[in-house]
Amino acid sequence: MTRFFWLRNDEAAQALYSADYNAAHKWGLPGLKDCPSCGATWSSWGHQYPAVDLSGLSERGEFEEARPEPLHELARLRELVRPLAPPGARLPPGTSFGPLVGTATGRFAPFSGLESCWILVRRDAFDSLQAAGIRGLLGCKTELRFRQKTPPEILELQLEPRGQLHPDCLPPDMEPPCATCGRLGVRLPEDPILDGASLPTDTDLFRAGNFSTLLIGTDRFKDAVEQGGWTGISFRELPVR
């Protein structure tokens, strides 16, 4: 039976490295301003598609500035990118696309960035995971600018929202998502429980579908990381019901 793990930043391992970076994804949907149903102005976090390239869109400049927009404008922009996104992607307000762009210095751990709810991986660690046959492994080039003459090759893994948290770990009086904008006004629980019937069987890496900041890996991924001696990532097993 497959076991599932919460993937988080290993602070002790990161302390052995000197990496520092300041970066953001190249493009993104705007946030939502004043939802006509729930009234919220909000933007999501954890819906990141670094493999989605908007450079071919004549309207790409409209995705370069973070800002809130009314629902009709958000919907217009979302439909422009939908054909380029993975099938079935929800694309909530604030969804980001394209490579991480910015500056970086120092030595990177094999894995980093998990505190920002994305996974950056060095090329040597990525190649090791590929050789181990990890399913759903999609590494995307970053556009991090290094000062050193021989910069490392840093990739970002694209993890898509799949599966759900089990209702048992959520507040019993939780309001359903807004029918108009999809906002779920609940924080990620401290002790998540996965809904076994909803979990994917074709990938070793994904995000929780209803809490996309929760990064999840299977025991196959955990074994490949540990057997390769790669550091920077910690594993906490998640119960399944």
Image (cartoon, grey):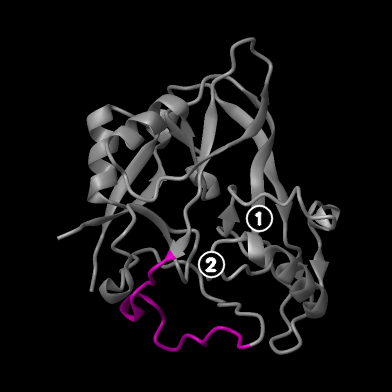
Spot occupied by residue 101 in the image (x, y as percentages of width and height): 69, 37
- Number of numbered discs on residues: 2
Q: Which mark sits nearer the N-terminus, 1 or 2? A: 2
Mark 1 residue element: strand
Which residue is drawn at the image coordinates 41% and 81% (left, top)?
171
Judged by depth in the image, the label closer to the viewer, 1 or 2, is 2
Which of the numbered marks, if any, corresponds to residue 87?
Answer: 2
- How many residues crowd mark 1 within 10 Å: few (<14), some (14–19), many (20+)? many
- When asked about the image quadrant of residue 237, the answer is bottom left
In the displayed structure, does residue 7 sit left or right of residue 197?
Answer: right
Which residue is drawn at the image coordinates 66% and 47% (left, top)?
98
Spot occupied by residue 130 in the image (x, y as percentages of width and height): 35, 36
Q: Is residue 141 above or below residue 34?
A: above
Q: Are marks 1 and 2 in contact (CB under 8 Å)?
A: no
Which of the numbered marks, if any, corresponds to residue 40?
Answer: none
Q: Residue furthest left?
A: 1
Q: Quadrant of the C terminus?
A: bottom left
Q: Which residues are magenta?
A: 162-179
Q: Amino acid at mark 1?
A: Ser
- The residue that mark 1 highlights is 96
Name the dominant secondary structure of the magenta segment.
loop
Mark 2 residue element: loop
**Residue 165 shown in magenta:** yes
In the displayed structure, does residue 77 sit left or right of residue 89?
Answer: right
**Residue 186 shown in magenta:** no
Which residue is drawn at the image coordinates 41% and 57% (left, top)?
206
Q: Quadrant of the N terminus?
A: bottom left
Q: Is residue 36 visible?
A: yes
Spot occupied by residue 128 in the image (x, y as percentages of width and height): 33, 30
